[in-house]
Image (cartoon, helix red, strand yellow):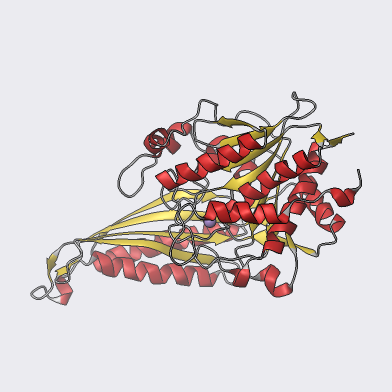
Amino acid sequence: MGLSNLRVDGARLWDALMEMARIGATPKGGVKRLALTDLDRAARDLFARWCADAGLTLSIDAMGNMFARRAGADETLAPVVIGSHLDTQPTGGKFDGALGVIGALEVARSLNDLNIRTRRPIEIVNWTNEEGSRFAPAMVSSAVFAGLMSLEEARAREDFDGVALGAELGRIGYAGAAPVGGRPFHALFELHIEQGPILEAENVDIGIVTHGQGMKWYEIAFDGFEAHAGSTPMARRRDALVAAARTIERVREIALTEAPLGVGTTGVIAIEPGSRNVIPGRAFMTCEFRHPTEAALARMDAALATAVAQIAAQEKVSAKLDHVFDCAPTTFDADCVAMARRAARSLGLSHRDIVSGAGHDACNIARVAPTAMIFCPCVDGVSHNEAEDIKPKWAEDGANVLLRAALEAAEIVA
Ligand code: GLV
Ligand code: MN
Ligand code: MN
């Protein structure tokens, strides 16, 4: 078979992306499909139906990770795994995650059309709760798969309403019987939108992801004293919100100290009692830092601890700082990276090496199996936003690279 035949069906890929994006569609053109909600169940059901139609065999593990298998000529060999996630941010876009899952499904559909058998099985994965916006931390189910977190700890994670991840898995019918992890992958490739501006700005078709930056997530609770907003002199106040506000500023300053690679964000803040004439007695906030090196992350971690202790003392409040998630910087596998690069080259696509700013399940799997990622551009680098957008050609190019990289790893049987 000539290499030129090895292409996905771009129109079918785009149609499937648009159909999936209807589940949880928002008025502003984005998607709200939080992990393990009824909408997530609907997305999973649709994905499962598509997999069955493509002749794939579905298995679901105890974290709800879905693996749809296309048999290989030698079923004793470890599979080549391709995929991403179907959950989204509360104001998410159509492509973060979905492109990787549906791009992988399109690979399987195309292999069926082309009548290609592979020596190794190919599995399409949909990882549970990649985003971490409903259940922290992000990438929780690939973490269990890679042995970085216990199943019990992950299933006990609660959302802001106190609902446990494990209970929600059962409720939507996706607590599967298969064990989580403990089996080898020959290779894993995750196709994803870049979520940053580099590829589009440089007019490059494909990002070959060589590294992923590390990240640290924190929760901070400040306890002060609720008091009357009119009659409490400024000097007597123990204002938890002022402590949080000062910490937010410090998070930004700490990131700027590590510029240009360091980033820091406060994403959630909640205060009690939240009455306009009561000094806030309690403030809860989350923050995170990211950087490609462990050394800088350690400096940011230490600086945050110092800042929180200082601010708490100055504002006369107590502070509880919890480090809730740690993802070390990732170096992707040189052989898998080379396969992705060769795939882009064989298609005549321009490509460049790139470091992922976002976290991905591939970063966890890279600790236990040869792994790489393929990026396609996204408009204006916008992601985690309902306006997130890509061009059909970008999706098709990315899926074509995924197809060829996966085929090199899985080996075509003549
Ligand atoms: C996941 O989307 C992350 O990078 O936080
Ligand atoms: Mn993603
Ligand atoms: Mn995301």
Q: How many marks?
A: 0
Q: Position of residue 224 (x, y in %)?
A: 21, 61
Residue 159 spot, x, y in % from top left? 36, 47
Q: Which image quarter holds the C terminus?
A: top right
Judge whether 2 appears above or below 346 on screen: above
On the question of residue 260 being in view, the answer is: no
Residue 304 seen in this snapshot: yes
Q: Name the residue at 48% across, 68% down.
A: 254
- Left or right: 319 in relation to 362: left
| Left or right, 409 with reference to 181 | right
Where is residue 357 shown, x and y percent of the image?
60, 61
Q: Please give the name of the residue rendered at 38% of the width and 68% of the height, measured from the top-left corner.
A: 248
Q: Position of residue 325 (x, y in %)?
A: 47, 49
Q: Residue furthest left?
A: 231
Position of the N terminus, as image quadrant, is top right
Q: Quadrant of residue 228?
A: bottom left
Whether residue 267 sits left or right of residue 352 in the image: it is: left
Viewer-side residue, 42 vs 333: 42
Seen as rendered, the residue at the extreme right is 2
**Which residue occupies the extreme top position in the image?**
76
Q: Residue at x 48, y 58 (%)?
A: 31
